Structures are given as structure tokens and as C-alpha cells.
Image: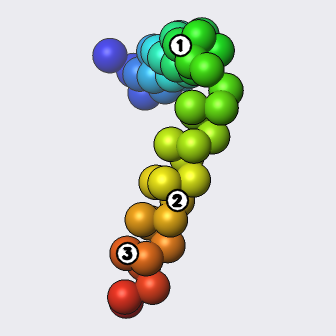
Amino acid sequence: MSLQKLIHNYATFNSWANSKLVDWLQTIDEGLLYQQFRQVSTVLILLFSTF
């Protein structure tokens, strides 16, 4: 398989996966989504501040 075909397949899959993720995220309650994001971002900030 050529490099061009591999890159095309990867880009096609990436586009499909991103579309599925966006479709799924649009079904989640916006308030819950932001609440979870704040909790995760707080943990990440604490984690990376230890380095």
C-alpha cells in the first residue's frame, strides 16, 4: 500500500471519528459537560504543577 493511500485512509478515518465524537458530545447536557471539564482540568493542573 502506498504512503499516499495510507495517509488518505488515516485522514478519512480521522474525519469520521471526529464527526462521531462531535455528534455524541452534542447529546450531552451542556452544564454537565462543563462541570466535568472543570473537574478534569483542575486535576490536570494539579498533576502538572508537581513537575
For this rendering, which residue is in front, 34 or 51?
34
Quarter of the image for residue 6 reads top left
Q: In this figure, which residue is indicated by the disc labeled 1? A: 24
Q: Residue at x 64, y 15 (%)?
A: 26
Structural crowding at the residue carrying mark 3, measured as other residues with C-alpha within 10 Å and reported as few (<14), some (14–19) or many (≥20): few
Q: Is residue 1 visible?
A: yes
Q: Which image quadrant: the N terminus?
A: top left
Q: Are marks 2 and 1 in contact (CB under 8 Å)?
A: no
Q: Residue at x 53, y 13 (%)?
A: 24
For this rendering, which residue is in front, 24 or 14?
24
Q: Where residue 39 sits: x, y (%)? A: 49, 54
Using the image, determine if residue 39 lies above or below residue 16: below
Q: Amino acid at mark 1?
A: Trp
Q: Residue at x 43, y 76 (%)?
A: 46
Label 3, secondary structure: give it: helix
Q: Where residue 33 sits: x, y (%)? A: 58, 33
Quarter of the image for residue 35 reads top right
Q: In this figure, which residue is indicated by the disc labeled 3? A: 47
Q: In this figure, which residue is indicated by the disc labeled 2? A: 41
Residue 34 numbered tag: none
Structural crowding at the residue carrying mark 1, measured as other residues with C-alpha within 10 Å and reported as few (<14), some (14–19) or many (≥20): few
Which sits earlier in the primary sequence, circle 3 or circle 2?
2
Type of colouring? rainbow
For this rendering, which residue is in front, 47 or 38?
38
Quarter of the image for residue 31 reads top right
Q: Amino acid at mark 3?
A: Leu
Mark 3 → mark 2, Cα distance in angstroms: 10 Å
For this rendering, which residue is in front, 31 or 37?
31
Label 2, secondary structure: give it: helix
Mark 1 → mark 3, Cα distance in angstroms: 28 Å
Q: Amino acid at mark 2?
A: Ser
